[in-house]
Amino acid sequence: MSSAASARALKWVGLAVAFVVAGLGLIFGFWQGLPAQEVILYTAATFALVAWAWRSYTTRGEVSAGAASEGPAGGGEEGESRRSMWRGFVAKNKWILAGLLALLLIFGICSITVDGFFSVLNIISLAVLIGLLVFSSFMSKFVVENRSAFIGLTVLVGLFVIGSLKVEGFIYAGNIKSMLLFASFLGLACVGQTMVAMLGGLDLSIPFVIGSANVGLLYIMGLGVPGWLAVIIIIVLGVLIGLLNGILSFRLQGQALILTLGVGFAVSGLTQILTSLGSRFAGNVFGSVPGWLSNLAAMNGTTFGLDVPPVILIWLVVAVFLIVGMKHTVYGRYLYALGGNRVSAARISISERRYWTGAYGISGGVSALTGALLLGWSGGGFIGVGQPYLFMTLAAVVIGGTSLLGGHGGYGFTVIGVLVLQVLTSFLVGIGLDYQWQQFIFGLLILPMVALYARSPHIRTQV
Amino acid sequence: MRPIEGSFSLREAAMSDTTVRGGRGTASTYLLVPILLFFILLIVAVLRSDSLVTSAGLGSAIIVVTPLVLATYALMVLVIAGRGTVDLSIGPLIGFINVTLIQLYDQQMLQSPVVFFLYALAVGVAYQLLVGLIIVFVRVQPIIVALSGYLALSGVNLVIMQRPGGIAPDWMQSWGLGISILSPVTAILILATVAWLLFTQTAFYGHLRLMGSDERAAFTSGVRINIVRLGAHAIAGLFAGLAALTYTSLISSGDPTQGTTYTLIAVTALVLGGASLAGGRGGVMGSLLGAVNIYLITYVLATFNFGAVQSFVTDLAYGSILVLSLLLTVVLPHIGRVVHSLSPLLFFVVLSLIGLGVIVHSNYDYAGSGDESAALGASTGIMVLGAESASEPEPPAPQAPDADADGMPTPREPAPAFVFERVGPGAADTTTAQSFMAPSLVAPLAIAGLLVLSTLIILRTTVAQAGGTKSLAPLVYIVVAGLVLLGIYAVARPGGLDGFNDVTAAQTSAATASEAQ
């Protein structure tokens, strides 16, 4: 017993040592100013070597002892059992193996058809990809809870490694900052979608509210209202629109998708009509954005002297607030309870109407805030600024692992989904793919990821 | 099934579906909203512009509306199949078939019309079957699969064709002209509708509806739900293929992005037609009306002149009408409880009488009126439209929407010419103004109202005497068929009718028919 415990401790120590050595290598590598790709490559190699060496020297005795005890069983039988084990392994993991083979096949085809595809970096990328796939598929058996977060994180790490290998300047501060900036816009837009999805609803009015807030804020400020007041007015209006969504869709929960879309159309049309009254250029609002607002969201903004746009900080605060709040407050727990089972939630007198409308209200308010921040980022009002968020919010929520049926998930998951989408975008832009290819890959990415963790049970188990 | 089905036109075909799916009463009361909306829009459209009810006007309307109708059908099949299936990828799918058709045709493939057709249908079915297989075997929520397909296909479309271009085959060029009601597109629309109605007679359709309303019940009662779901997807694929073909004929070229917009419009049309996205409710009549309503909303708004904010007003109107019609479906059960035996069929007949009255009136009543009054009317119209134009520096008139009903001839002198030029694209022409003569509108409307009232009373007494609905249905079919034939006659031969004489004759004949029963 004690020897087993000590052996385990030895193993962990080995891992820690490997980690420290690799980390030192990483730090020194960057300190010396080597290219990022090389540093990462050497770090990974050091880590693997140290871990392997440690293991082979510390556990050799055990292995040989085990082999000795099995010694008399005879070679033929051992080969037989190994073969059957192999067969069982293949049968158990046939889908994963098929996926790996397909991946190799695609790689081969690409190498043959595309010039310059067959390079060291690409092979390493492939190896990393396969390694991560194998790792996650084997580990996911042990990760029972929050499997989606685990898979999302694995994909995120994989993307990061491959991205830094393939794309020049991928992990430098500027690029990471811009990734975080766009991620915070998307992440803020996803707040409402997550809250609503937790209850089993959908909010498609988000892009329209974002666009309307964007144009409306500039218009209100153009009327001479001070900036801070204008932002507050816009957010209050957003909350009101959200509440309207919630009240209207409460009796039509199955149709929340289309109802919010209708409200969105109406809001965006109304905003544009109101803002173009008395204007010669319908649909366009001209005006200047105050400096503090553009500092809030622009790429070169500073937070307390730090060279980081404050919007990232805002997103961080909102995310922490939501993650902690949904886990530890009564409101958050009741939200899960309602999403899980309406009847049992009603039995402990949770007002479904209040929570439903509340979630939509929050969604509207945060969307309006996003619109206002986007105004600071772009410097000009544009009603279509929210359009990319129409399905991207949904995609981020789904990839993160929040169930669209409600009751499972949370904002933490959505953060992972947002980061995956953003890093993937950055990577795809980096390797020179156009917008349409990005969309295509997003579409293809959603299915396997969701299939890994959000499969519904077979109908025969539901009867 | 009644022998009349499919033999006349779309309208009866759709009507008979209503009776199949639950006759009158609560089962299909949700159809009341689209029917009411349809006739309100139709009457307004006819009053605003007399170019709609002409051979060319109806022809172009059919050309424009058919892709939307077929896309809505495709969505309808999947909505009936349940599990919250809203196929968001229908728009990109239409675009995908469109761009691949055009690209392949430009590369000297798919030259034969038959192959062209088969390719479109096969791609639609193949895609939908793939989606169905994923839903059935991977067991991911349908909306996630649809979302994934939306993103992937709209990306691929842009890869296949960067910008709009290409030319449709020669034999298809003439389809999109829209100068006559009877075009291949109309034939496709009618065929698709009739095919769906025939399909509703099969046991498979029964299984489909059972599965859509309660999948577990269907499973336990031995329905092979996997097969049924795949079948529903295959049918949806067929409709999507047809929608793509008619869409191609509409634009006569390839367009990678425009097809994508069909997703939101088709979902809107589906809901405007009274279907429930939650599943279990939906029908061909509702989908047809919903799609036509969408077209009419755009059409009516185009006759008003909102200047630069035109598209925003359209957005606003879409949104508000969508929300209102959804809210009405919530209220409807309560109305249905108060008003018993409220039959959508009867409702439809009554409203179609009103609509026909207005159409006939606006088309033929003023044909012989003097030049002087026409000129007066024209100037009135100009004034009204000028006042409505929101792009003017002066504040817009708040009474703009109902200006057509009671707009008085203004004593001011006619508006300057540049206002006149901006009166409207296409639909709102100088001829539009003729239908503005508000005072003389009253009498025909009153006649139409009286006619409707009398017909209603007669029909009502018939119902009371018969004591059941079954004997009423054939009568209603006869009335509707007569009306439609009359309408076709009126459209085909302008000037063939003198005022209301023939209509009243038709009415009396219908009335005698009902009395005879």
Image: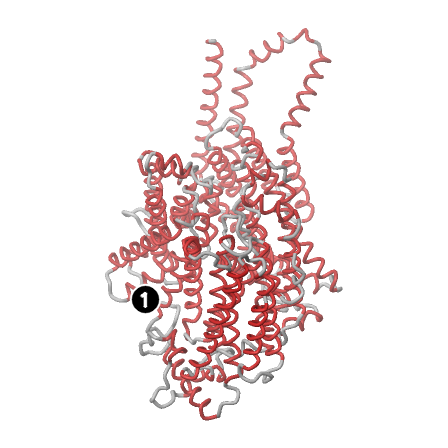
Residue A323: give x, y in percent of width and height: 36, 38
Residue B222: give x, y in percent of width and height: 63, 37
Q: Secondary structure at mark 1?
A: loop
Horizontal arrangement in the rendering, residue B331 relative to residue B123 (left or right): left
Residue B514: give x, y in percent of width and height: 57, 68
Give amino acid for label 1: Gly
**Is residue A432 among what the camera can see?**
no
Q: Nearer the viewer, residue B73 or A162?
A: B73
**Vertical position of residue A173 compared to residue A21: above or below:** below
Q: Nearer the viewer, residue A289 or B403?
A: B403
Which quarter of the picture shows residue A289? bottom left
Q: Nearer the viewer, residue A117 or B112?
A: B112
Label 1 environment density (alpha carbons within 10 Å; few <14, some 14–19, many ≥20): some
Q: Chain of mark 1?
A: A
Residue B275: give x, y in percent of width and height: 51, 54
Horizontal arrangement in the rendering, residue B472 relative to residue A270 (left or right): right
User: Which residue does the numbered mark 1 point to in the structure image?
Assistant: A287
Which quarter of the picture shows residue B64? bottom right
Marks counted in the figure total: 1
Horizontal arrangement in the rendering, residue B428 relative to residue A96 (left or right): left
Q: Nearer the viewer, residue B328 or B420?
A: B328
Residue at horizontal 59%, vertical 52%?
B77
Q: Quadrant of the C terminus of chain A?
A: top right
**Vertical position of residue A194 compared to residue A21: above or below:** below
**Is residue B271 among what the camera can see?**
yes
**Colour mode of the rendering:** secondary structure
**Vertical position of residue A402 compared to residue B454: above or below:** above
